[in-house]
Image (spheres, grey):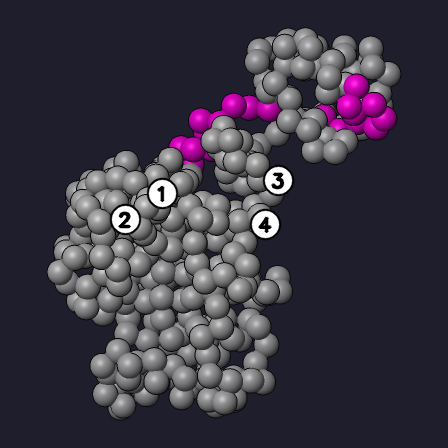
Amino acid sequence: MLEDSNNNWVIETKNLSKMYGPHLALDGLNLQIPRGAVGVLGPNGAGKSTLFKCILGLIQITSGSGKVLGFDIQKEGEKIRSKIGYMPEYDALDPGLSAIDQVRYAGEILGMNTDVATQRAHEVLEYVGLKDQRYRKIDTFSTGMKQATKLACALIHDPEILICDEPTNGLDKRARKFMLDTLRRTAEEGERTVLLSSHVMDDVQEVCSSILMIYKGKVVLQKKIDELVNQVEKEIEITIWGGASIMETQLIDNGYKVRRLGRILRVTLMDDNTIIGILKIAAECKVQVRQLKEYQPDLEDIFLLIMDKLGEEIKGTSDLMTPKHIGGN
């Protein structure tokens, strides 16, 4: 569990379970999520979307309990939904509307009167960088502009919690940076809680201070990212030319833990003699050492290591991408 000095959990569940017939989608989840930006990770089918639906009060849980902002997920779903903004991965925009009409309509659906919704639409479109494009039709928008419009729709009612599903899909470098900066600003300066579900670990690491990882309906990890990175075993990364397979075998035979990525071998740093041992084996295998350095693991490395320990065959986090024709997990 993550520590919260005020014991002020934004989302809290106790032994929350959800079954679809004989299938156990969520298995006794115990969560305590504080304010801030949280990355929600897990492979397809892990239970992320089911968890979101449960905390929104959109589906009935099978057992256990939960609260969002102090409201009971089983009895006060409407109140909860009024305080949560959702930016979906799928295309949820009407191409025939202008951005201002689309965002205003999103506000009206939430119960805002037309004048208030119009004023807020202007404000949030400026916030997401679309002030000068707000009267253009959505079907003329780039992917980045469409993503920004979806974010504006999610922010129209100034929610306390923002759920974003793959917010940087299809964005170029500039649009991606603006989207991530906006989400970070929403969490830090706006003091809102952002739940970011993404297969791009760099995005999660850039915006979020902690992660929640779900696997087969269970919480397998909930930790601050800084603490997690510090707990991972240090590795020596060696880039070689020729004989990578032979050297990998020799390292393993000599008791080293090895991760191979083509011509790059990452060897767990066991003691002060590890580097000397690696170079000795490289000389014996007659390979060319192009580079040798201490490797600093990032969030993607950590995720893949955890998935490997759980027996999940994932070569890269792109495998976590939800196919466009599948509506959730």
- Mark 4 surroundings: few (<14), some (14-19) or many (≥20) residues within 10 A: few
* Disc 1 to disc 4: CB gap under 8 Å: no
Disc 4 residue type (three-letter)? Ser
Disc 1 residue type (three-letter)? Gly
For marks 3 and 1, give the one nearer the viewer. 1
Q: Earlier in the sequence, mark 1 or mark 4?
A: 1
Q: Earlier in the sequence, mark 2 or mark 3?
A: 2
- Mark 2 surroundings: few (<14), some (14-19) or many (≥20) residues within 10 A: many
Residue that label 3 marks: 315
Residue that label 2 marks: 18
Residue 145 lies in the magenta stretch = no
In terms of secondary structure, where does tag 2 sit?
strand
Residue 242 lies in the magenta stretch = yes
Q: Quadrant of the C terminus?
A: bottom left
Residue that label 4 marks: 318
Q: Which mark is residue 147?
A: none
The x and y percentages for residue 273 are 64, 9
In terms of secondary structure, where does tag 1 sit?
loop
Q: Earlier in the sequence, mark 3 or mark 1?
A: 1
Residue that label 1 marks: 217
Instruction: Residue 161: tell me if it is visible.
Output: yes
Q: Quadrant of the N terminus?
A: top left
In terms of secondary structure, where does tag 4 sit?
helix
- Mark 1 surroundings: few (<14), some (14-19) or many (≥20) residues within 10 A: many
Q: Say if 211 sits above or below 308 in the image.
A: below
